[in-house]
């Protein structure tokens, strides 16, 4: 008679290993090398944390109350090992939820915020933007929506994730704008790798890269830092649509566009401390005019 594999004979091996009732060597007798490496990586991640306390007995009891019951059945249909695996699954699910807990910072219209991360890295968040990162990991994998300036220390890989692609650095200063159909990265110090649409671009100091609706371009800049840090937003051949979005991020107004081609390109800047001056800085070069409807809406049109 053929002998059953050990992982069939002993169906509680995973629960026993989690409870430290069997050793790593014994676990390897029940699983493949690939499965063992996966379990060990998970265990190493858990060891870096202060593990939360889970009441597996209570979880198991709650699980049993949700299982269907047949009043006419008198014999035991579910073997003990199923309960053990279910309890282990609940434990793993709780730990993954613990690992995925995040910290998020958001700014409102006209607001900015400085965020100090560990290892000396700093994020300067522009108006109407947000960043998030894991609460219990190393704070070097950041999600961004909007605009932020990063000062990253040279202490390991640092990644910024956006809806359009990712930016990786080892230590540098750079600015990122990520909005709908728009991603822009400017490197001021060090080296930046931008990955988008399955391609990667390497940016050195004073290199800029942009993707608008999937179309990419690069150029050089003589700026030494992001202009918005000094209270001014600047643009180079940027469609009017995104310029107006940036203006609405700085001022509590709604811009209403009448019969305008919002794809026309704007090169210039506007201030963050005077709405009238900001509107003139945009409208005059483009041959536009503006009219205030009420306290919160402004209509832009051709002269």
Image (cartoon, rainbow, N blue to C red):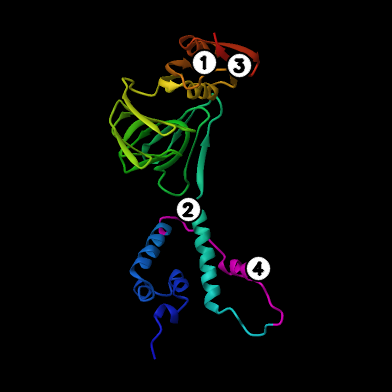
Looking at the image, tell me whether mark 1 or mark 3 is earlier in sequence order. 1
Find disc 2 in the rendering and name its residue: 99
State whether residue 52 appears in this view.
no
Image quadrant where residue 248 sits:
top right
Between label 1 and label 3, give the one nearer the viewer.
3
Does the magenta-highlighted stretch encompass residue 149? no
Would you name the residue on which mark 1 appears? 273
Q: Secondary structure at mark 2?
A: helix
User: Against 185, is 87 above or below?
Assistant: below
User: In 3D space, how far apart are the residues under numbered discs 2 and 1 (Cα atoms)?
Assistant: 41 Å
Tell me what residue is drawn at x 35 percent, y 73 percent: 28
Query: Is the C terminus in the top left, top right, bottom left or bottom right quadrant?
Result: top right
Q: Earlier in the sequence, mark 4 or mark 3?
A: 4
Query: Which numbered disc, 2 or 4, marks the residue that appears first in the sequence?
Result: 4
Mark 1 crowd level (few <14, some 14–19, many ≥20, 10 Å Cα): few
For mark 4, what is the residue? Answer: 66
Start-end of magenta stretch = 47-72
Q: CA distance from mark 2 to mark 4?
A: 26 Å
Report how far apart the C-alphas of labels 4 and 3 lie in the structure. 58 Å
Proximity of marks 2 and 4: CB atoms separated by less than 8 Å: no
């Amino acid at each position: 008679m053929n002998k059953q594999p050990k992982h069939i004979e002993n169906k509680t091996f995973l629960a026993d290993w989690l409870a430290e009732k069997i050793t790593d060597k014994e676990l390897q007798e029940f699983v493949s090398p690939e499965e063992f490496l996966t379990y060990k990586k998970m265990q190493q991640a858990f060891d870096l944390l202060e593990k939360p306390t889970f009441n597996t007995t209570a979880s198991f009891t709650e699980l049993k109350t949700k299982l269907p019951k047949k009043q006419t059945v008198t014999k035991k249909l579910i073997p003990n090992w199923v309960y053990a695996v279910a309890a282990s699954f609940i434990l793993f699910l709780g730990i993954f939820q613990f690992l995925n807990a995040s910290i998020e910072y958001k700014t409102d219209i006209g607001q900015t915020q400085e965020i100090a991360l560990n290892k000396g890295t700093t994020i300067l968040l522009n108006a109407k933007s947000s960043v998030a990162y894991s609460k219990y990991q190393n704070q070097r994998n950041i999600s961004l929506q909007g605009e932020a300036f990063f000062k990253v220390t040279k202490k390991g890989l640092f990644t910024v994730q956006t809806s359009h692609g990712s930016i990786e650095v080892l230590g540098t200063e750079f600015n990122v704008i990520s909005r709908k159909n728009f991603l822009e990265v400017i490197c001021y110090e060090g080296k930046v790798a931008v990955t988008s649409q399955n391609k990667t671009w390497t940016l050195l100091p004073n290199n800029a890269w942009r993707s608008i609706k999937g179309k990419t371009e690069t150029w050089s800049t003589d700026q030494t830092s992001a202009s918005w840090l000094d209270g001014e937003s600047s643009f180079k051949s940027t469609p009017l649509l995104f310029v107006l979005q940036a203006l609405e991020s700085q001022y509590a107004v709604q811009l209403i566009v009448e019969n305008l081609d919002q794809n026309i390109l704007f090169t210039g800047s506007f201030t963050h401390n005077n709405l009238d001056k900001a509107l003139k800085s945009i409208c005059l070069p483009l041959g536009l005019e503006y009219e205030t409807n009420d306290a919160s809406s402004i209509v832009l049109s051709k002269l």
